[in-house]
């Protein structure tokens, strides 16, 4: 089963590499799902959250623009697997050619999928298996200070 997730925010976490590692926090099924990302991905997500346009299109903006120009749409992003500490995602898309619909699925890094979903406002879903393995109770996170609440 899949559950719709919301992005609680992008912050700094502590990982195996130490503190200062960017992390995106997803709220899903009453739990927090932390996913460590690169600094570039974190910046791209935060710009989308804030609605701040960049002078030139960032990679995620460019991809969204190209998909639309090709007559396609991004339907949803799925974070559907976790293996050896690595999250896996898929981007579900559709394209209309004439009167026929063509569904396509693309393998993606979760960070790219999340950044894209923030731009097109499509559903972001996470599988039960991923939540069961990596979800954490909200009490484990001090997100109110981190997110300015």
Image (tube, grey):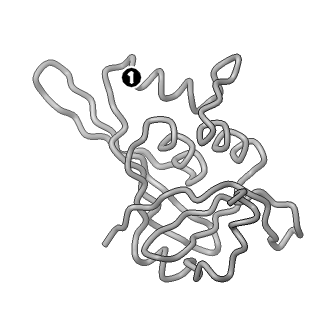
Q: Is residue 33 above or below residue 61?
A: below
Work out which quarter of the rendered image holds the C terminus and state it: bottom right
The quarter holding residue 83 reads: bottom right
Image position of 66 (left or right of 41): left
The quarter holding residue 85 reads: bottom right
Residue at left 75%, top 61%? 146
Residue at left 70%, top 61%? 36
Q: Is residue 85 above or below residue 78?
A: below
Which is nearer the eye, 30 or 3? Answer: 30
Image position of 85 (left or right of 92): right
Q: Position of residue 6 (x, y in %)?
A: 48, 58
Residue at disc 1, secondary structure? helix
Q: Position of residue 51 (x, y in %)?
A: 59, 33
Image position of 142 (left or right of 104): right
Give the residue at mark 1.
68
Residue at left 38%, top 62%? 4
Work out which quarter of the rendered image holds the N terminus and state it: bottom left
- Number of residues whose C-alpha sits closer than 10 Å to that of mark 1, classed few (under 14), some (14–19) or many (20 or more): few
């Amino acid at each position: 089963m899949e559950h719709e997730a919301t992005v609680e925010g992008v912050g700094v976490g502590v990982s195996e590499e130490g503190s200062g590692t960017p992390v995106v926090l997803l709220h899903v099924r009453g739990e927090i799902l932390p996913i460590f990302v690169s600094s570039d991905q974190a910046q791209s997500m935060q710009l989308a959250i804030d609605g701040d346009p960049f002078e030139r299109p960032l990679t995620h903006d460019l991809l969204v623009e190209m998909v639309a120009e090709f007559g396609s749409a991004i339907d949803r992003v799925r974070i559907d697997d976790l293996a050896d500490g690595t999250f896996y995602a898929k981007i579900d898309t559709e394209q209309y050619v004439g009167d026929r619909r063509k569904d396509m699925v693309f393998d993606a890094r979760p960070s790219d999928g999340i950044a894209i979903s923030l731009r097109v406002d499509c559903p972001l879903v996470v599988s039960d298996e991923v939540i069961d393995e990596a979800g954490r109770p909200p009490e484990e996170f001090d997100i109110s200070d981190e997110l300015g609440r």
